């Protein structure tokens, strides 16, 4: 499917992510598996009302799990992975954090007490970003003054120009968080974003992102949750289909072409061990096996 040129309505996949984060927060009530205590504010009013019921919470969780097995667990792991990087950067007082395709990311608000000398640039399509700001304001949640919202059409506008107009400097150490986005873009757009991060002059800068492993004819029958996920994406998210996939070796090549070196690569098993295992080594469940976490730093 061709990549969208303009996003005219708020992202549906971002809303489903917020739903899963909100349900995880209600279900686990801890910082490890349900840390996003603000996700609920991004849901429509009717959903917020209905989810006051424990039985509806459970039914909704189970329906989402049945539609896309392992996706609830993946969102839990993904949220924890990016939370950890974001919080560590704030504690180190890194000068800049750039959220690429921020969606309903609530980290700047959840971790506001740790923001001191860090400017946080949040970039996303205008419809999603505007709705996010309205939801936060309606809930009475203070947006930290260090946050700068930058509307952008990633498919048609220059990332460098948008950030430069807002005061971003490639001379400063930067953490780029690119969560839940790469697989909705064509490969040239992925490469362009990575190349931008690769131009950072501080070698201790970092870009962290998740990718979808390459899909082959064998994938639906061999990867946990893949068949249902691919069917659901085709049925319900036709405007946000998978466009970019890559195996580990391919990803290293793409990174090298963008002046980046891979510093971390976590496959599904590694993600489950690190982010879905509770006390006593007990797993809370299997994640959708298609996804990987990648971190990379400027090569020179």
Image (cartoon, rainbow, N blue to C red):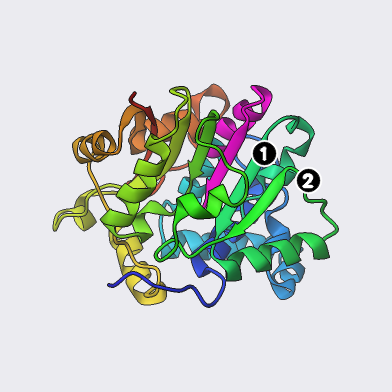
Give the residue displayed 44% in from the left and 62% down from the top: 157
Dot 2 alpha-carbon crowd within 10 angstroms: few under 14, some 14 to 19, many 20 or more: few
Instruction: Give the residue at the far left of this rendering.
Output: 217
Q: Is residue 97 magenta?
A: yes
Return the disc, 2 or 1, that comes first in the chain's sequence: 1
Q: How many marks?
A: 2
On screen, residue 63 above or below 32 = below
The residue at the point 59 percent across, 52 percent down is 165
Residue 253, quarter of picture:
top left
Give the position of the N terminus as an image quadrant: bottom left
Q: Which type of secondary structure does the marked residue at label 2 adopt?
A: loop
- The answer to whether residue 140 of the structure is visible from this angle is yes
Please, is residue 24 above or below residue 251 in the view? below
Q: Gap in Å between the C-alphas at discs 2 and 1?
A: 9 Å
Q: Nearer the viewer, residue 64 or 209?
A: 209
Question: Which one is in front, 141 or 194?
Answer: 194
Name the side, left or right, on which 13 lies relative to 298. right
Q: Which residue is disc 1 drawn over?
A: 119
State the residue at coordinates (35%, 38%): 268
> In the rendering, which numbered label is found on residue 265?
none
Tell me the element at label 1. strand
- Where are the magenta residues, as a range? 82-100
Residue 14 screen position, x and y as percent: 54, 61
**Residue 12, image x and y in percent?**
52, 69
Characterize the local packing of mark 1: few (<14), some (14-19) or many (20 or more) Cα atoms within 10 angstroms: many
Q: Residue 271 location, x and y as percent?
A: 41, 34
Q: Which residue is mark 2?
A: 145
Quarter of the figure with the C terminus:
top left
């Amino acid at each position: 499917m061709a990549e969208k040129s303009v996003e005219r309505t708020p992202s549906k996949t971002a809303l489903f992510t917020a739903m899963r984060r909100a349900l995880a927060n209600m279900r686990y009530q801890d910082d490890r598996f349900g840390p996003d205590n603000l996700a609920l504010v991004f849901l429509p009013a009717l959903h917020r009302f209905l989810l006051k019921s424990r039985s509806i919470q459970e039914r909704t969780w189970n329906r989402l799990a049945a539609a896309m097995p392992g996706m609830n667990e993946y969102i839990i792991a993904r949220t924890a992975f990016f939370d950890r990087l974001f919080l560590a950067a704030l504690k180190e007082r890194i000068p800049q954090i750039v959220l690429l395709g921020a969606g309903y990311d609530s980290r700047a608000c959840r971790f506001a007490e740790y923001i001191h000398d860090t400017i946080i640039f949040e970039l996303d399509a205008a419809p999603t970003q505007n709705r996010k700001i309205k939801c936060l304001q309606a809930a009475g949640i203070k947006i930290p003054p260090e946050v700068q919202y930058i509307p952008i059409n990633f498919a048609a506008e220059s990332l460098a120009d948008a950030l430069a107009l807002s005061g971003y400097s490639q001379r400063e150490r930067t953490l780029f968080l690119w969560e839940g986005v790469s697989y909705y873009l064509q490969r040239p757009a992925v490469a362009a974003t990575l190349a931008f991060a690769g131009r950072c002059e501080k070698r201790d800068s970092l870009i962290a992102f998740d990718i979808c492993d390459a899909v082959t004819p064998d994938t639906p029958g061999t990867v946990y949750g893949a068949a249902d996920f691919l069917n659901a994406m085709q049925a319900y998210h036709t405007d946000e289909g998978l466009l970019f996939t890559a195996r580990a070796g391919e990803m290293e090549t793409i990174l090298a072409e963008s002046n980046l070196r891979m510093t971390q690569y976590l496959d599904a098993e590694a993600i489950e061990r690190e982010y879905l295992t509770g006390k006593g080594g007990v797993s809370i469940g299997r994640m959708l096996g298609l996804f990987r976490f990648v971190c990379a730093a400027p090569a020179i």
